[in-house]
Amino acid sequence: GVNLAGRSFLSLFDFTAEEIRYLLRLSHELKGLRRAGVRRRLLEGRHVVLIFEKTSTRTRCAFEVAAADEGAHVTFLTNSQLGKKESLEDTARVLGRFYDGIGFRGYAQETVEALARYSGVPVWNGLTDECHPTQALADVMTIEEYVRKPLSQVKLVFVGDARNNVARSLLVISAKLGMHFVAVCPPALSPDAEFLARAEEVARGTGARIEITDDLDGVEGADALYTDVWVSMGEEEKLEERIRLLEPYRVDMALIARTGNPEVLFLHCLPSFHDTNTEMGRLVYERFGIKEMEVSDEVFRSRHSVVFEEAENRLHTIKAVMLATLGAV
Ligand code: CP
Ligand code: NVA
């Protein structure tokens, strides 16, 4: 059997296909239990701390609600000494004595790795510049709910900035689970060679297929189309360049039709720029005259879109990761 007690969840590369499948099964089970109103309180008496360098809605709330559902107490750490008067190493050593687990969101992957090394307790990566592993779990969970065939027969197409954290984690989970993953992106935004070589080595062992193309015909036969923002947190100065590179890659109804699959799913990790009802949306409209960025409002609201189910699944998958690594299941 699978035993993840004491492990950190920093990158999907660190987990076997069997371990990932176990976390997915547990997530589906936890969703069923929550819907049925079953309260198990498997983390009663435990303490969890969250350190977020970047903004968040889903990830923070998923950690807090998942912990509360299971009876754990959460500290969302703000206004701490970290980085100002105290080093990461010293902070991690202190937090490891108070808390059973640490959730982190931020910039450098090295930070989340150092937290795990020095705290000695499980650390969960809630997004870094490099990857977003809990997101990919929720995405595959959502695909399993809607696509009624084995993952080994599923074609997942990511359209847009294929170098970003979300795309990279999707690529790795696809490689691990033997899926067919296609990145449709401009060459300047295709995954870097070293990362790709590492993922392709995983794919050779699982029978996964990984393709990178700048041709929109790559969406043909997709079971799921996925996109993410053109500008990730921390790279706001790249806005103009990204609009220029990625405008041809907007997911609109024509691209949905180009899949040839009338049942194709649309996924997005959210938040998404599909209208001008945000600060960013208004700024982009004023500066560039564009009302929609990576996805059209029409696709976002269409019957293909499962983005809110996907968002809910962040809760169940993050709960699964916490329960498994804290040895509570
Ligand atoms: N998808 C996701 O991570 O959302 P937040 O940035 O709101 O946490
Ligand atoms: N790629 C996005 C994902 C947000 C959940 C970012 O890093 O901003």
Image (spheres, rainbow, N blue to C red):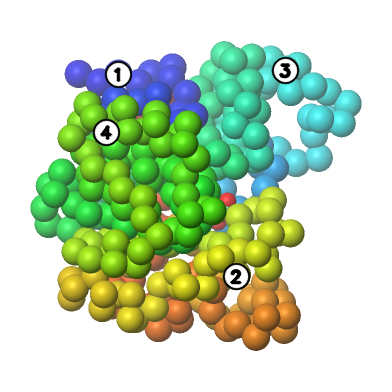
CA separation in Å, label 4 and label 2? 32 Å
3 or 4: tag closer to the N-terminus: 3
* Residue matched to label 3: 89
Residue 172, relative to residue 4: is it above or below? below
Percent of width and height locating residue 270: 49, 61
Q: Nearer the viewer, residue 219 or 28?
A: 219
Q: Which quarter of the picture shows residue 198?
A: top left
- State the residue at coordinates (26%, 78%): 257
Query: Mark 4 = which residue?
Result: 203
Three-letter residue code for mark 1 = Asn
Q: CA distance from mark 2 to mark 3?
A: 41 Å
| Residue corresponding to mark 1 | 3
Query: What amino acid is labelled 2 in the image?
Result: Arg
Quick check: 160 above or below 27?
A: below
Q: Which one is closest to the eye, mark 1 or mark 3?
A: 3
Q: Is mark 3 within 8 Å of ligand 2?
A: no
Q: Residues within 10 Å of mark 4 (few under 14, many from 20)?
A: many
Q: CA distance from mark 1 to mark 3?
A: 28 Å
The mark closer to the camera, 4 or 2, is 2
